[in-house]
Image: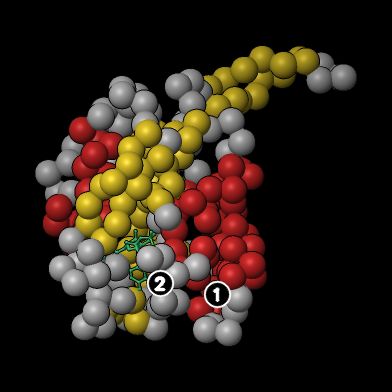
Amino acid sequence: MQVHVADHPLIDHKLTVLRDERTDSPTFRRLTEELVTLLAYEATRDVRVEPVDITTPVTTTTGVRLSTPRPLVVPILRAGLGMLEGMQRLLPTAEVGFLGMIRDESTLEASTYAERLPEDLAGRQCYVLDPMLATGGTLAAAIEFLVRRGADHITAVTLLAAPEGIERLEAELAAVDVPVLLVTAALDERLNDLGYIVPGLGDAGDRLYGVAH
Ligand SMILES: O=P(O)(O)OC[C@H]1O[C@H](OP(=O)(O)OP(=O)(O)O)[C@H](O)[C@@H]1O
Ligand SMILES: O=c1cc[nH]c(=O)[nH]1
Ligand SMILES: [Mg+2]
């Protein structure tokens, strides 16, 4: 797995406001979108394109367009949904599939409660969106699922990643025969005893959408 940690003062600035416990939900949602649009620029660096001939007002020339099949963007509900619009801003023609996953807060085990994805992902580049890579259980399961469906290139986009989660992803995906890239706005210090990222930003889903019951 390749890991790319963003390095840009605007990303650091927006992330600092996002982390602040005083930041309210509407601001949190807007900043998440803005951050993802900035990250999407890096995350889509190897999006597949094909040559296309066009005519400008002056001459004919060859450019590029997104290849088919089009990329698939997969937000992991709930929190990943907050990243969708930011990604779509750069990839408006991408298809979107959904995975609903929840981490049991006592065992930290991830489980899937909803799935709406194409049956066959052969030849597809997939962009998985989840703001938090904590223990890595959620993202590892999501990526394994997409690879089983045939995806042949995976890019995971996160806001925060913990070293423990990256280590687990690397171990669990070692046998996966598909290139995986992780693009994250920041690499945080560690997990605390409850499995929360430190310094982190708290529960991303709750801060985007309110406390889940
Ligand atoms: O790396 P992990 O240890 O698996 O933890 C990360 C997961 O936890 C959060 O989701 P949560 O289960 O809180 O669901 P939510 O998005 O509905 O709030 C977060 O959005 C990730 O999906
Ligand atoms: O810090 C964390 C860890 C998992 N999920 C979150 O939303 N935040
Ligand atoms: Mg949550």
For residue 66, which quarter of the picture?
top right
Q: Residues within 10 Å of mark 2 (few under 14, many from 20)?
A: some
From the top left corner, tell me how far across and down residue 141 is, in percent.
Answer: 22, 49
The amino acid on which the numbered mark 1 sits, given as a three-letter code, is: Leu
Give the x, y percent position of residue 163.
Answer: 26, 71
Quadrant assignment for the C terminus: bottom left
Question: Residue 118 sits in which quadrant?
Answer: top left
* Residue at 46% over, 39% down: 73
Amino acid residing under circle 2: Asp
Which colour assignment does the render follow?
secondary structure
Left or right of 141 on screen, residue 66: right
Q: Quadrant of ligand 1?
A: bottom left
Q: What percent of the width, then of the height, locates residue 203?
A: 40, 72
The single residue placed furthest to the right in the displayed view is 57
Q: Position of residue 85 (x, y in %)?
A: 59, 48
Which residue is at a point 44% across and 58% down the rendered structure image?
A: 79
Which of discs 2 and 1 lies nearer the camera? The answer is 2
Position of residue 61 relative to residue 168, above or below, is above
Left or right: residue 129 compared with residue 121: right
From this viewpoint, is residue 28 visible? Answer: yes
Mark 2 residue CB less than 8 A from any atom of ligand 2: yes
Q: Is residue 122 left or right of residue 6?
A: left
Disc 1 marks which residue? 18
Residue position marked by numbered label 2 in the rendering: 203
Mark 2: secondary structure:
loop
* Residues tagged 2 and 1 counted as in contact (Cβ below 8 A): no
Give the class, few, some or many, for how many residues have Cα within 10 Å of label 1's Cα (few <14, many ≥20): many
5 or 100: nearer the eye? Answer: 100
